[in-house]
Amino acid sequence: MIKKVAIEELQPGMHIERFDCGWLDHPFIFNSKRIKSEGEIERLKDWGVTHVYIEDGHNPPPVPVKIERERPPPPVVAFEHIVTPQTARVDRELRHIPIRHEIVRAQKVRQRASQAAKNILADVRAGKKIQTREAETAVGELDNSICHNKDALFLLMRLRKKDEYTFDHSVSVGVLLLAFCRAMGFDQETTRTIGLGGLLHDVGKMAVPLSILNKPGSLNDDEFKKIQQHVIYCKEILATTHNISLPVAQIAMEHHERFDGSGYPHGLSGESISLGGQMAAITDVFDALTSDRCYRTGIDQVEVLRKLYGWSRNHFNEELVHRFIRCIGVYPAGTLVQLESGLLGVVVESTDNLLRPVVRLIYDTRHDWAVSQKDIDLSKPHGKGGEDRIIGYESAKRWRINPLKVLGIT
Ligand SMILES: [Fe+2]
């Protein structure tokens, strides 16, 4: 018999038949699994899972668990084969200005893009036509900043207000798509077209009642169908907008389609989804899961990259997911990491080596004391910072550390 149990009743050894939440709202690749450790239960709690369904009477007695602090899973490294001299060169070009210089400009650019997104969405809500000029200017400025140093805008994406999700999400998907396109080596025109698609991808949500959009609890079937309708509304809104090219409309229409045909509204699969639509699906899920929402807190970027990697065999184009992870970095800027030496630090920016970014040291876990802050470049040779290495990422929430504050961004 299937029984619903609270997460507090779950024990290692039990077999979860299914979760009491959507596929995107739990940390595992499959919807059923045997729980192997207390750490896995902690991860479920971190993701806000409150109940699961187990097969009652068929669970073996709980296995003894060694009590120790949870060690986060190892980084995703299997995609390293896609790093070619060409992708490494393109990545280097996307950080040719130091982040400390670009961050100030990026803050202003992001603010203007956010205002443009607000104006567009307010116009749509009021039934007015979209004026694309302000959006195009914002996309151009965001693209310029990414070409200086993509990590600056990536870092700022972590600065979010819960009640401004729709605006922030539109800008973030635009930023992610611009960086993704640049990392793929696309030309400026293609990049900015796809970036504009990112900024406009959710305009249809303005036709969905706010009571459903901002509902803190889970949605019933009827409400979920109304949310799904936003892609159809997108098509209708963009069809009446001047100067909207086909790739932009495709991004809005296809960002909820899935490579294996499991998405909506049309259940398109494989290459019948446009390239922009496939890329938008990846960036949309990445940003949605890493953001705080009215019904749950955001998940660490590293966790979400792991999850995307797991889904890349079915829901998304595998090659594109690999390229996206390469673009964001295994340890994105702002991630809290633990080093082999026992030191704890925040990733400042990426380097040529995916696993060896620049890290700002803040704490010594072996002695349990704060250390004077200092940046080390783990990609440098021994004696210049390269003697240490990252052994895993840490939850900033669990350590009660604000990575942005450490990096001087508030
Ligand atoms: Fe959407």
Image (spheres, helix red, strand yellow):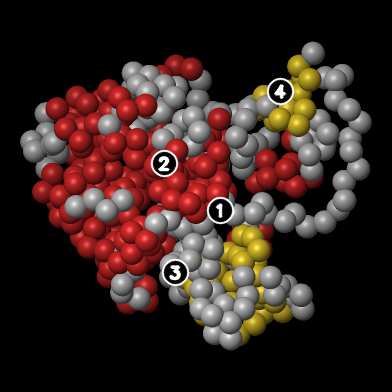
Residue appearing at x 68%, y 54% in the figure: 72
Residue type highlighted by circle 3:
Thr
Disc 1 on helix, strand or loop? loop
| Kind of residue at disc 2 | Glu
The quadrant of the picture occupied by the N terminus is top right
Residue 9 shows up from this direction: no
Q: Earlier in the sequence, mark 1 or mark 2?
A: 1
- Amino acid type of disc 4? Glu
- Regarding mark 2 in the picture, which secondary structure is present there? helix
Would you call the spot at circle 2 few (<14 residues within 10 Å), some (14-19), or many (20 or more)?
few
Which dot marks residue 77? 1
Name the residue beneath numbered marker 2.
319
Q: Earlier in the sequence, mark 3 or mark 4?
A: 4
- Give the farthest residue toward the top: 1
Q: How far is mark 4 from mark 1, CA to CA? A: 30 Å
Residue sitting nearer the eye, 319 or 228: 319
Q: Is residue 286 left or right of residue 71?
A: left
Q: Position of residue 250 (x, y in %)?
A: 24, 31
Of the residues shown, which amino acid type is indicated by label 1? Val
Of the residues under marks 2 and 4, which one precedes in the sequence? 4
Quarter where residue 240 is shown:
top left
Q: Earlier in the sequence, mark 2 or mark 3?
A: 2
Label 3 CB, ligand 1: below 8 Å? no
